[in-house]
Amino acid sequence: MFGLSELALVLVVVIAVLAVKKGPDLIRSAGKATRILKAETRTPRTPGPGAPEHPGGPSPRDGRP
């Protein structure tokens, strides 16, 4: 019968084989997600037609009391 060390070795081999097959796809998709996230954080958002002028936060001071 198999002991704990043999099962652990089989598990490590299976994980290594799967990592070799799926690794490049996972890394590629992670890179795409990172590029999309960076692009979204760099572009300013324009408010939609029904959006408030200054969402969340105090109104800007324009010199009037």
Image: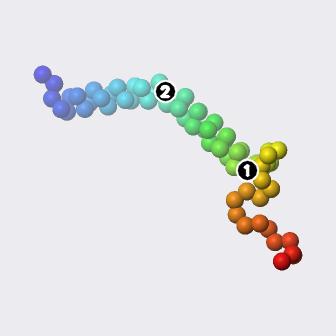
Disc 1 is placed on an element classified as: helix
Tell me if mark 1 has few (under 14), some (14-19) or many (20+) residues whose alpha carbon lies within 10 angstroms of its own.
few
Front residue (pair 59, 37): 59
**Image point (66%, 41%), residue name:** 35
Disc 2 is placed on an element classified as: helix
Question: Where, by quadrant of the figure, is residue 31 drawn?
Answer: top right
Front residue (pair 56, 40): 56
**Image point (34%, 26%), residue name:** 14
Q: Quadrant of the C terminus?
A: bottom right
Q: Earlier in the sequence, mark 1 or mark 2?
A: 2
Query: Which disc, if any, is residue 42?
Result: 1
Which residue corresponds to mark 2?
22
Percent across and percent down for residue 21 are 47, 24
Q: Reply above or below: 30 against 38.
A: above
Amino acid identity at mark 1: Arg
Tell me if mark 2 has few (under 14), some (14-19) or many (20+) residues whose alpha carbon lies within 10 angstroms of its own.
few
The mark lying in front, picked from 1 and 2, is 1
**Image point (49%, 27%), residue name:** 22
Question: Where, by quadrant of the figure, is residue 19 drawn?
Answer: top left
Percent across and percent down for residue 53 are 80, 56
Percent across and percent down for residue 1 are 12, 22
